[in-house]
Image: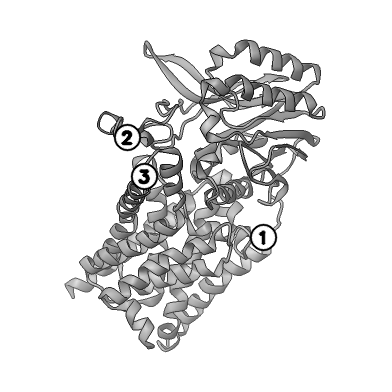
């Protein structure tokens, strides 16, 4: 065993530093770098780093990996806090470190569980399978706990990689499962080969090679088919500065901007504006929206725009981040997955007033109901996702299964020039691939684009440019296996693997 590998597997600060680096390199496996083999390397180093540690040591090692991952991969949070939250460089840096240190426990706890109950050093094949289940479990858990932070999942690295063909079969988490299994099997290969047990060697080879062969074979396979003719689209990217977005003095200028760009656009079936393109309550913009609806109807178009909406809930006026359709369409959608601090403030009685970041405009949105109808336009069902919602795999699958088209609108201005918008775009591409449906993506300052059912961008407007994106999308029907079964097959497999590992661990301790 080489000296660097001993650093990885044994306790002490060298191994912990290597864990921080392993977490950080995951960022380079994802957009905009897309060096997908680094995802395998990062997961493999995490697995190797837990081989010889006691549970408490594993807790620290897992935390170090998470600190590296989120410190590098979510550096855009510093940009948002400093540039738009009014925090000084030192305060923004401190809050960023505090956030990273807290969220790193999403890896610390699974590492402790692994070392305490699931690790089976004496059974390398079973150990690799249990680890893959644990890896998917931690990804799913951090996408759910306290509304979730489903960012930087390893499976996204395969959007253009050999395993992309598995996404429509079992979703992004199946891809993550295969990556973790592959990394663990590669690490355990020497022990498997020297075990002399031909059955286990053959099974290990099948588990190692089979998913990659399947992923390559299924890449580009059409699981869905057109349900109608292509629809022409114009998506408007206004490129409005975030500092102007909620400035009352700039309201008329923003409304005029989208009006004039729409008037100059070519006639299309679907005219799309981004999130909160109308930066005033819908009830206060009824005249404006009625005028734009008449314009769209004259062109036989449906105009879909983001707009804040106020509704009465249990005798109380609540604000929602919404989408509405005018012209040749119908429907209103209220956002269900809210961004912490951007759209609501956790523990707001304690935090509001401390710094400007906790008092951002429109940071008191309510969560929309779960049983909403889809948007309708030109006779088709459109699944809407506002900004953050598109990063939730299971949530997106639930809406996508009822739709002909996917739509996501966003205001990625919060990310500035960081890597955040490109990470966000990559996740939207994965949702289109999982669903086998076209996706329209309209943002305030980029990247606005059209994504085909294979997750590939067909048309786009670069960041920080004002313009109109033209293209065509095709309504699709039929369901991919993932939309049909969701993650239940994978969940059942992971639960069985957990049970197997726990029973084996208990038996080994009683012998």
Q: Secondary structure at mark 3?
A: loop
Residue 88 is labelled as 3
* Residue 127 shows up from this direction: no
* Closer mark to the observer between disc 3 and disc 2: 3
Q: Secondary structure at mark 2?
A: loop
Cα separation, mark 3 vs mark 2, equals 22 Å
Residue 218 is labelled as 1
Residue extending farthest to the left is 510
* Residue 89 x/y as whole percent: 38, 49
Residue with the mark numbered 2: 346
Please count the marks in the image: 3
Label 3 close to label 2 by CB (< 8 Å)? no
* Residue 336 x/y as whole percent: 46, 31
Cα separation, mark 2 vs mark 1, equals 43 Å
Label 2 close to label 1 by CB (< 8 Å)? no
* Quarter that holds the N terminus: bottom left
Q: Is residue 190 left or right of residue 448?
A: left
Cα separation, mark 1 vs mark 3, equals 50 Å
Which is more N-terminal, label 2 or label 3?
A: 3
Circle 2 Cα neighbour tier, 10 Å, few/some/many (<14 / 14–19 / ≥20): few
* Quarter that holds the C terminus: bottom left
* Closer mark to the observer between disc 1 and disc 3: 3
Which is more N-terminal, label 3 or label 1?
A: 3
* Closer mark to the observer between disc 2 and disc 1: 2
Instruction: Answer above or below: position of 65 versus 268.
Output: below
Viewer-side residue, 281 vs 247:
247
Query: Who's the residue at 49% across and 43% down the image?
Result: 392
Query: Who's the residue at 25% across and 75% down the image?
Result: 12
Viewer-side residue, 262 vs 365:
262
Circle 1 Cα neighbour tier, 10 Å, few/some/many (<14 / 14–19 / ≥20): some
């Amino acid at each position: 065993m080489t000296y660097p590998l001993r650093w990885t597997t044994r306790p002490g600060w060298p191994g912990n530093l290597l864990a921080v680096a392993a977490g950080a390199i995951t960022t380079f496996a994802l957009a905009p770098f897309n060096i997908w083999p680094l995802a395998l390397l990062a997961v493999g180093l995490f697995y190797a780093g837990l081989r010889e540690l006691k549970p408490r040591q594993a807790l620290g090692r897992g935390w170090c990996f998470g600190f590296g991952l989120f410190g590098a991969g979510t550096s855009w949070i510093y940009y948002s806090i400093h540039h738009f939250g009014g925090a000084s460089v030192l305060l923004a840096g401190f809050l960023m470190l505090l956030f990273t240190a807290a969220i790193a426990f999403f890896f610390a706890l699974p590492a402790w569980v692994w070392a305490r109950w699931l690790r089976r050093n004496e059974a390398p094949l079973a150990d690799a399978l249990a680890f893959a289940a644990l890896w998917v479990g931690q990804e799913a858990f951090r996408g759910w706990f306290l509304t979730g932070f489903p960012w930087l999942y390893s499976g996204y690295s395969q959007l253009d990689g050999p395993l992309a063909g598995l996404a429509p079969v079992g979703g992004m988490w199946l891809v993550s499962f295969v990556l973790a299994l592959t990394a663990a099997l590669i690490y355990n290969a020497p022990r498997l080969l020297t075990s002399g047990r031909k059955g286990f060697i053959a099974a290990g080879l099948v588990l190692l090679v089979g998913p990659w062969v399947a992923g390559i074979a299924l890449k580009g396979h059409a699981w869905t088919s057109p349900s109608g003719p292509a629809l022409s689209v114009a998506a408007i990217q206004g490129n409005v500065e975030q500092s102007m977005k909620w400035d009352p003095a700039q309201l008329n200028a923003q409304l005029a901007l989208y009006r004039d760009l729409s008037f100059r656009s070519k006639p299309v079936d679907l005219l799309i504006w981004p999130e909160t393109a109308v930066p005033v309550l819908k009830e206060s913009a009824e005249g404006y929206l009625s005028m734009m609806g008449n314009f769209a109807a004259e062109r036989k178009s449906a105009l879909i725009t983001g707009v804040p909406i106020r509704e009465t809930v249990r005798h109380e006026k609540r604000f929602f981040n919404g989408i509405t359709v005018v012209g040749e369409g119908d429907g209103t959608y209220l956002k269900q997955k809210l961004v912490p601090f951007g759209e609501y403030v956790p523990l707001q009685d304690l935090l509001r007033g401390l710094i400007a970041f906790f008092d951002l405009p429109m940071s008191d949105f309510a969560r929309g109901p779960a049983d909403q109808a889809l948007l309708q336009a030109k006779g088709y069902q459109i699944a809407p996702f506002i900004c953050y919602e598109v990063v939730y795999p299971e949530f997106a699958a639930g809406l996508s299964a009822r739709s002909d088209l996917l739509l996501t609108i966003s205001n990625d201005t919060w990310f500035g020039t960081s890597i955040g918008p490109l990470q966000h775009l990559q996740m939207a591409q994965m949702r289109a691939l999982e669903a086998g449906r076209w996706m329209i993506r309209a943002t305030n300052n980029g990247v606005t684009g059209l994504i085909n059912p294979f997750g590939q961008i067909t048309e786009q407007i670069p960041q920080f440019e004002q313009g109109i994106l033209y293209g065509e999308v095709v309504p699709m029907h039929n369901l991919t296996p993932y939309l049909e079964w969701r993650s239940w097959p994978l969940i059942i497999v992971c639960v069985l693997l957990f049970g197997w590992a726990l029973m084996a661990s208990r038996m080994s301790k009683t012998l």
